[in-house]
Image (tube, rainbow, N blue to C red):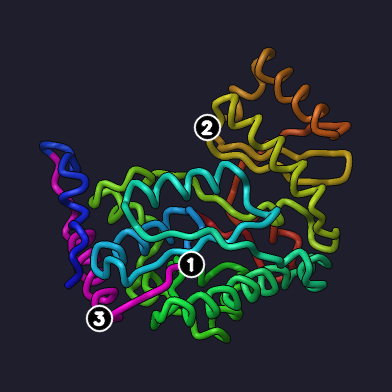
Amino acid sequence: MSSASSLGDLHPAVPPAGSAPSPRAVEQLSALRAYLRQLGSALVCYSGGIDSALVLAVAHEQLGERALAITTVSASLPQREKDEAARFAVQLGARHQFVASHEIERPGYVANGPDRCFHCKSELYTIAAAQLEAHGLQHILNGTNKDDLGDHRPGLEAARQAGVRSPLAELGFDKNDVRSVAKLLGLSNWHKPAAACLASRIPYGTSVTRERLAQIDRFEQEIKDLGFSQVRVRWHGKVARLELGADELARALEPAVRQSIISSGKRQGFQYVTLDLEGYRMGSHNEILPGFALRVV
């Protein structure tokens, strides 16, 4: 057992007084703790999202200094996500490093075919393997959960080829389970909206470039600064197709807010800003692929 403080000690106010954790969450947390403890040491591929954040939190709790998180940094990582990933790792007291990633130099990634994620994750796991050896650790972990297995995720094949382990998926955690266990632990980001790399905003078959990624990132950050939480700027040349959470669509059409969004989009180089009336939905990037229906969540 490591000397790391238990997460219950770090967050004694959670769960709130008068509430009781679900038996399922308690059981799953126990299983995740046991799973990670028996690994001995681990490197966590930590994106800053709630899935890998949960793996990191429990790995740090159970393994202490024998757990290391890496976050790869490239043009596809939003600046806000990078900052939030750093803050959360500091809050935990976990070992965490940023490592430069160069997927933009891989032709298969730049071509942006339906297998783009394979090339991106292959870069990630190549970096992770080098860090694993450098730090004398035993296992590479990611934050894949059971729900991810039903979507178009070429990165899963990259993980398989690299021998990466997925504790959440192996233990049967779906996205709701992840949030429930993270909330039970008192993790500050348990309710964080789903995120994805900026390259997922660019349609398949359209080249990924640093300039396009930066343009998307700037526009999304400005929209979030207006108070929107679930934001995707889908890049279509001079047109930005904006996906917002369904409960945020009405506010986007308020005259002052609408004008702020339009002005921001044009400031970032888009000639037209459109609002997708279906709102944000997971997997919309894959709707054009034959055989991949939109996943219901």
Label 2: which secondary element: helix
The disc label shown at residue 45, or none: 1
The amino acid beneath tag 3 is Gln
Label 1: which secondary element: strand
- Kindly identify the residue that appears in the image at 59 percent across and 32 percent down: 224
The amino acid beneath tag 2 is Asp
Q: Which residues are magenta?
A: 19-45
* As drawn, 71 above or below 15: below
Mark 2 highlights which residue?
Answer: 247
Main SS, magenta residues: helix
- Kindly identify the residue that appears in the image at 20 percent across and 69 percent down: 2
Relative horizontal placement of residue 174, taking residue 244 as reference (left or right): left
Relative horizontal placement of residue 31, taking residue 20 as reference (left or right): right
As for residue 26 lying within the magenta part, the answer is: yes
The disc label shown at residue 229, or none: none
- Looking at the image, which is closer to me, 8 or 270? 8
* Distance CA(mark 2)–CA(mark 1): 32 Å
The amino acid beneath tag 1 is Cys
Q: Position of residue 209 (x, y in %)?
A: 82, 55
Q: Position of residue 294 (x, y in %)?
A: 62, 59
- Kindly identify the residue that appears in the image at 53 percent across and 58 percent down: 98
